[in-house]
Image (tube, rainbow, N blue to C red):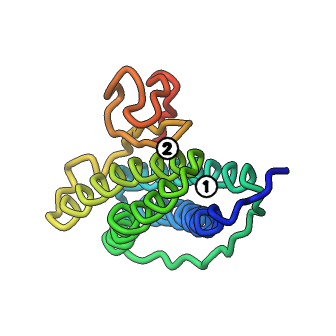
Amino acid sequence: MPVMTADATTTMTNLLKAYEGEVNAHTRYVAFAIGAGGDGFHGVASLFRAAARAEQIHATNHARVIKELGGQIKCEIQGVEVKTTLENLRTALAGETYEVETMYPAFLKEAKTHRITAAIRTFNGALEAEKTHARLFGEAIALVEAGKSDTWIAAARTFYVCPVCGYTSDSPVEHDSCPVCKCAWKRFEAIQ
């Protein structure tokens, strides 16, 4: 079993925080998808399911690195309060925005300082996927607020998730390969 160096202590703490955050985001988004479907927002439900799958991939990747560095996986699952679809979208966007603007950039900076390559890779993959989640949640919020129930937010929609890094797209063929990890596009999971 690898022994964690003193330089990796903060990165390990960050990995554990990221792992717990991703596990809880997965749980939250699964619940939000059920709520959105019940509210008649089937496209939003599809988006929540796709984001939930991406968060699950991030958690798995973080867990792998934690184990590689000799750490132990631990996580506290938080309760989920499902509100209206609009409120749930706003909650999701706030979480994604925090990860994109604050959490992952700080975690990446620390990992880069100590050249912990595996942590850099998992944090970067999650960061790039969270950017797409924030964009898609923002788009859904605008449509719900505008009452545009004749758009994608109402009908089930297919989203595409990279099985390696969790990058999420609303396009069936965005590139030949994942723009983050270079996984072949044909391997992407279709989530509806």
Give the numbered dot on residue 166. Answer: 2
- Furthest residue in direction left, as rendered: 146
Q: Mark 2 is on which residue type? A: Gly
Q: Would residue 105 be found to the left or right of residue 141 on screen?
A: right
Considering the numbered disc 1 on the image, is that residue within a helix, a strand or a loop? helix
Mark 1 packing: few (<14 Cα in 10 Å), some, or many (20+)? many
Cβ atoms at labels 1 and 2 below 8 Å apart: no
Per the image, label 2 sits on a secondary structure element best described as loop
Closer-to-camera residue (8/161): 8
Amino acid, disc 1: Ala
Q: Can residue 23 be seen by looking at this rendering?
A: yes
Rendered residue at 27%/46% (across/down): 152
| First in sequence: mark 1 vs mark 2 | 1
Q: Position of residue 157 (x, y in %)?
A: 37, 42
Q: Is residue 130 left or right of residue 77?
A: left
Note whether 31 is above or below 50 in the view shown. below
Residue carrying label 1: 59
Q: Where residue 69 sits: x, y (%)?
A: 72, 54
